[in-house]
Amino acid sequence: MDLLRGTGLRKKFISKDKEILAVNDISFTLHENEFLAIVGESGSGKSSLLRLIAGLERADEGHLFYRDEEYTSKKCGYAGKFLQMVFQDAYSSFDPKMKVVESIKECNSAECEAELKRLLEAALLDEALLYKRPRELSGGECQRMSIVRALNSGADILLCDEITSALDVSTQAQIVKAFKELREKRDFAAIFVSHDIALMGMLCENIMVMKDGVCVEEGETKAVIENPRDEYTKLLIENARKQSL
């Protein structure tokens, strides 16, 4: 059974009296414990696709399934039962007046306490950070804390929207390491939206490349990066190599 599946997804937006087909006939499959990257430049449609998957936008056409149960037309909050979004701006996802622990704790039982402690350790976070306010944490700490919060909710799918783009290279490496550690402690799947194909190559086993709302290439990440077929994919890889020099 597939964990998450989308078929024939389409979404149009109107901008300045112009119709934009942001997502054009996209289908995908996410398996148990799989990390899937959706990459492309700004305007490629990747974030629009993620919002459809999360139920934050309603698809004009197509279908979405969680464990073979369709949720395309369910109410906005329905998908929150099994997936959680992690956003680029981690600070804005926390209440600035509350200590972090107040935003994260689901319950006070010994079992819940132990699970939260395991997640913090895997995310390379000191437990003392729970008792600070969000702005007292560094950008990397706050982003990792938002990942811990998402997993602590019980979700088995994370949707990560450009979560490393505002961070420096060393902090990005910490995020990648935290995800790898968390994966060893807890079973979950994730979809990462990013413009950074090189970083996604370090994290995700499968990849989808989007351009102008269309999937131009997909497959095993290593194979796509080492032997890209589409010219747009080749351009993304070349740009990533230039930036690393």
Image (cartoon, grey):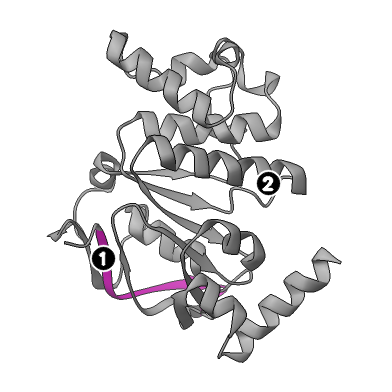
Toward which corner of the image does residue 115 lie, by quadrant? top left
Quadrant of image for the N terminus: bottom left
Q: Is the residue under label 1 in contact with that under label 2 (CB below 8 Å)?
A: no
Badge 1: residue crowd in 10 Å (few <14, some 14–19, many ≥20): some
Q: SS of the residue at dot 2?
A: helix
Q: Is residue 174 above or below residue 120?
A: below
- Extreme residue toward the front, this view: 184
Side (left or right) of 74 relative to 190:
left
Task: Please give the range of residues in magenta.
Answer: 4-18
Percent across and percent down for residue 220 are 46, 73
Overall secondary structure of the magenta stretch? strand
Residue 168 visible, this orientation: no
**Lower sequence index among marks 2 and 1:** 1
Where is residue 179 drawn, in percent x and y? Answer: 51, 43
Mark 2, residue position: 172
Q: How many marks?
A: 2
- Whether residue 127 appears in magenta in the rendering, the answer is no
Instruction: Pick the quarter of the image with the C terminus.
Output: bottom right
Residue 53 on image: x %, y % = 34, 59
Disc 2 marks a residue whose amino acid type is Gln
In the drawing, what numbered circle is on residue 221?
none
Image point (26%, 43%), residue name: 82
Q: Quick check: is 9 in the magenta stretch?
A: yes
**In this figure, which residue is indicated by the disc labeled 1?**
5
Residue type at tag 1: Arg
